[in-house]
Amino acid sequence: MKYRYHKAAAQELEESADWYERQSTGLGREFINEVDHAIERILNGPETFELFDRELRRCPVRKYPFHILYRSNNSEIEIVCVMHTSRRPGYWWDRDTLNESE
């Protein structure tokens, strides 16, 4: 199964990794590694994670206060948001997933 990031989700990942890297050298890379592990878990069992709403599921990122929100169909996972669990709830609800994925 393939996956792709919504454009805004890719930007969130990059900005969050940059923030962690500024806190401590190497921490940004560690954050990205944990996100990659979460994506591997999603790819291995996309239906196993909590249904967040009628079409989105939520996978926690271990060691960090983030969740990956995604939707899946038979052939692809779309990562809609790399969401910090304590910031601006619902800011990503209006993302147009058909036109803004990378």
Image: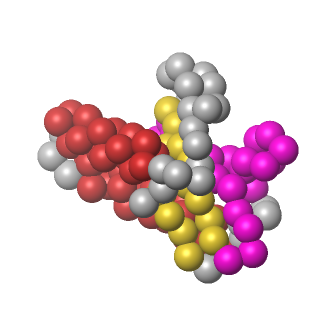
In the rendered view, tell whether residue 45 sits above or below residue 63. below
Q: Is residue 55 left or right of residue 9?
A: right
Q: Quadrant of residue 41?
A: bottom right
Residue 89 visible in the picture: yes
Residue 62 visible in the picture: no
Magenta residues, start to end:
49-75
Name the image quarter holding the C terminus: bottom left
Residue at image point 26% right, 35% down: 19
Name the image quarter holding the N terminus: bottom right
Q: Is residue 99 left or right of residue 53?
A: left
Residue at image point 36% right, 55% down: 32
Q: How many marks?
A: 0
Q: Is residue 28 left or right of residue 89?
A: left
**Residue closest to the eye, 96 or 16:** 96
59 part of magenta stretch: yes
In the rendered view, tell whether residue 93 sits above or below residue 67. above
Q: Is residue 87 left or right of residue 19?
A: right
Residue 33 placement (x, y as % from top left): 38, 61
57 part of magenta stretch: yes
Residue 55 placement (x, y as % from top left): 78, 49
In the rendered view, tell whether residue 28 sits above or below residue 38. above
Q: Residue furthest top?
A: 88
Residue at image point 63% right, 71% down: 76
Q: Quadrant of residue 12?
A: top left
Residue 85 placement (x, y as % from top left): 56, 30
**Residue closest to the eye, 65 or 91:** 91
Residue at image point 53% right, 20% down: 88
